[in-house]
Amino acid sequence: MTAFILVSGLHTGGWIWREVADRLTGSGAEVHPVTLTGMDGASAASGTGLDTHVQDVVRVIDGLDAPEIVLVGHCYGVHPALGAAALRPDRVARVVCLDTAMPQDGDPAAKLVPSPAVHAHLAERPGLPVPAPAAGGWDVLGSTAGVPAEALAELARRAVPQPAGTLTQPLHLSEALTTVPTTGVLCTGNGSSIAMVEALLGLGDPRLLALTAPGVTFFELDTGHWPMLSTPDPLAGVLLGAAAGEGHRMTAPELPAHLRPFLLDVPERARERVGNVDLYFPDEPGPRPAVVFVHGGPVPRDVGPTPRDWPGYVGYARHVAELGAVGVMVDHGLHDLADYPVAASDIAAAVERVRADPRVDASRVALWFFSAGGLLCADWLANPPSWLRCVGATYPILAPMPNWGFPADSRFRPVEAVRSAGDLPVVLTRVGQERAEIAATVAEFLASASASGACVDVVDIPSAHHGFETVDVNDETRAGVREAARAVLGRLGV
């Protein structure tokens, strides 16, 4: 018989697993929802920390006779779950990380908490318990998509303050933990998906290679951050599948998608490299209008080649140069989600460098954003300069994912910035096979643009996927790239 130990996240106790526990028990499993020290409504002792919660889980493990124990950690709960597994690796058959990243040895739990309010509290009131979000404010910890109103009300009513030490004390993991199989359960409504993880893996980040180990599997659920409340039946099914060793297994591609050839056969063209900027000049004499391409990310700092040498971006820059504009590709500093301000500064500096070139018509410039680089268009939409004649956006992310931890007043929200775009033209390439979590941001952007009267032209490519330029090579995608390029260049008078 499998015994499931269910460890809940911030501000909650074992009660949150009630429906999932019933379903697991009905399938013949032994189930032990854990209410960690201080999470039962009683005041936690001042010394309560992560080690306290790790020992809570260890005591449950030591009290069981079941031959197979599966530890499930939701959100913060993965820290005490992993800490306990590291101390009892011979007793734990699998650890399930439910809608949370995998922490590393020495990481405090606060490192993976997305809420800016939590970080502000820990900085301004160190040592004091972190209050639970107010009713209606639980999205700061992750999307509440799919949670019934009554369950959300119970969550707010029963929530308790989180002892500060549980978030600031470092997690201690041993080498023995590497022998324990793990399963990641990703919630698409909170901004995670198998496709997104595979895309990051394809970038070659060595830190992610552990995800390809034989004992690592993945599932995804089409819901928000609280699947035990929103989708208890599917979650129970996933947990049973994880216990059986089922799930998707990641593999590192021999040739990552972003390094495959560009879908258009564009002629070779010399480039000029100045700092972090590559320029591809057309055959026509200058000054000529320019299109500045802004890559997505985050791209790990040590990954090579860098985006300005990826075939897709090189292909776009050469294509617009072939059509009569200066193609510009910029490497910017989006290496981590916290780097958006750095990347924005890099782009602004690159644009000024390009406009200062006498071969460029400084009064006719377009910016073209891709994927998660789409958030960087917010500055330009919110206050468009007169020389900015068009903004392009291809399979863009136009609002931060719920689990990215962006503050509510973040400047990187194109869904809001477009309301101030005025008559600045936007050419948006929408792919029909987009990941659901990204497509939702595009739909929100288009609704906001429509309500504010913004000028957005949509180029639809029904068969295309995210990053289609090197993976979906067909007549429809080629036509889509050409149409988008013509639309952007048309706004530049080319």
Image: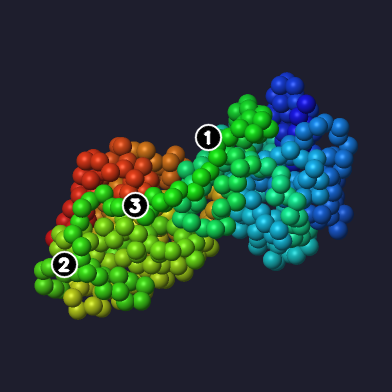
Q: What residue is pinned by disc 1?
A: 222
Say which element carries label 3: loop
Query: Disc 2 to disc 1, how far (Cα)?
Result: 46 Å
Query: Disc 3 to disc 2, how far (Cα)?
Result: 25 Å
Say which element carries label 2: loop
Residue type highlighted by circle 2: Pro
Q: What residue is pinned by disc 2?
A: 282
Q: Quadrant where the N terminus lies?
A: top right
- Looking at the image, which is closer to me, 340 or 306? 306
Q: Position of residue 465 (x, y in %)?
A: 36, 42
Residue at horizontal 84 percent and vertical 52 percent from the top: 52
Is label 3 or label 2 in front? 3
On the question of residue 299 being in view, the answer is: yes
Quadrant of res 357 = bottom left
Is label 2 or label 1 in front? 2
Question: Which numbered disc flags the more N-terminal residue, 3 or 2?
Answer: 3
Say which element carries label 1: loop
Q: Quadrant where the C terminus lies?
A: bottom left
